[in-house]
Image (cartoon, rainbow, N blue to C red):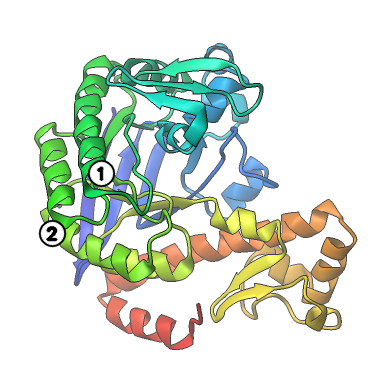
Amino acid sequence: MTLKYILQKQDGLARAGLLETTHGQIQTPIFMPVGTQATVKAMTPRELDEANAQIILSNTYHLYLRPGHDLVKEAGGLHEFMQWHKPILTDSGGFQVFSLAGLRDISEDGVVFRSHIDGSKHFFTPEKVMEIEQALGSDIAMVFDVCSPYPAERSQIKAALEKTTRWAKRCKAAHKRADQALFGIVQGGLYNDLRRKSAEELIDLDFPGYGIGGLSVGEPKPLMYECLDELLPIMPKDKPRYLMGVGSPDCLVEGVARGIDMFDCVLPTRIARNGTVFTSYGKLVVRNAEYARDFRPIEAGCGCYTCQNFSRAYIRHLIKADEILGLRLTTIHNLYFLLHLMQEMREHILAGTFDRFYQEFFAKWQD
């Protein structure tokens, strides 16, 4: 099988569904922890499972550079290589390649770029990216797209989305793996007419799911929400919608409220390594001096391993002493917090009480 989406309940625009993949069922809405190089930083697969992660994301660009997709294929595919036996989504590497700025050159055929590791020269085409993603063996693969920066001229964004459509057609033609679903990616920046154009062209290609790219790249949050308000009503209701690169708790709630099903972001693991953690009241910088004698858990009532066993004072001590355990404990908490938040939203959607949850969340949350 490739992929099947079942919409179970809609409460307002918020959706609860089931996503059937080759490696198991996913309950949506869902947040996907990012395992860029075949590992979610500081976490073991067992810890991810205990935190109730249902699907993780890995990166095509990074795994192509090292250890190489051929090696991963030889190991039995990404699931076997990293010993994660639930679903995996691989991005196409488009965002990483286009972030290289002076290290790449875009043409109609593809992108010539230099490795950020050793400066070696490489060439990504839509066909090459499909070869890599099929070798990795993820459950969901993304097309190779052109991600525009923010801000950018309308002409640049229009050219990028048109190339994204052409490349999406080439990706679909090159993609042959029957047990892997291929998602299209909607581009168009903050121009509503360009977003509609991109979405309509990709919908015509009939992908089993759709990513929304080119957001959360520096634009103010209200502009992102306005873009989603215009775009989502034309997206197919019987297919999953994936907002790429979004992971702040308030953005997850706002995204679900508008009908998004899937999210990913490096934010929870990245800020954890800087000693910052999520709470229901906003972010807390646990490494700060004010927590040196604070013997409470990060968040009262949190069910994660960190909060069930350790105090803010102890975690701060570990971080200040450069002990690896400190960063592992903050990472465990942040991922649990987001995964639990998604589960909580799903339960409210199924119960028809999502609006009450939304109001209560923002009554407490401080950005």
* Residue 208 x, y percent position in the rendering: 22, 36
Compared with 183, 330 (above or below) is below
Asked if residue 337 can be seen in this view, the reply is yes
| Corner quadrant of residue 228 | bottom left
Compared with 219, 35 (above or below) is above
**Secondary structure state at the residue bearing disc 2:** helix
Taking 212 as reference, is 199 left or right? left
Which residue is found at the position 81% from the left and 55% from the top?
A: 325
Residue that sits furthest to the right in the current view: 321
Which residue is found at the position 20% from the left and 55% from the top?
A: 191
Where does label 2 land, which residue?
A: 233
Asked if residue 332 can be seen in this view, the reply is no
* Residue 94 x, y percent position in the rendering: 40, 33
Where does label 1 land, which residue?
A: 157
Mark 2 vs 1, N-terminal side: 1
Taking 315 as reference, is 11 left or right? left
Which residue is found at the position 79% from the left and 83% from the top?
A: 290
Which residue is found at the position 40% from the left and 31% from the top?
A: 92
Amino acid on which disc 1 is placed: Ile
* Residue 71 x, y percent position in the rendering: 58, 13
**Secondary structure state at the residue bearing disc 1:** helix
Q: Which mark is residue 251?
A: none
Q: Badge 1: few (under 14), some or many (20 or more) residues near its Cα, within 10 Å?
A: many
Considering depth in this image, is 270 or 351 the residue closer to the camera? 270
Considering depth in this image, is 300 or 321 the residue closer to the camera? 321
Compared with 207, 212 (above or below) is below
Amino acid on which disc 2 is placed: Pro
Taking 226 as reference, is 316 left or right? right
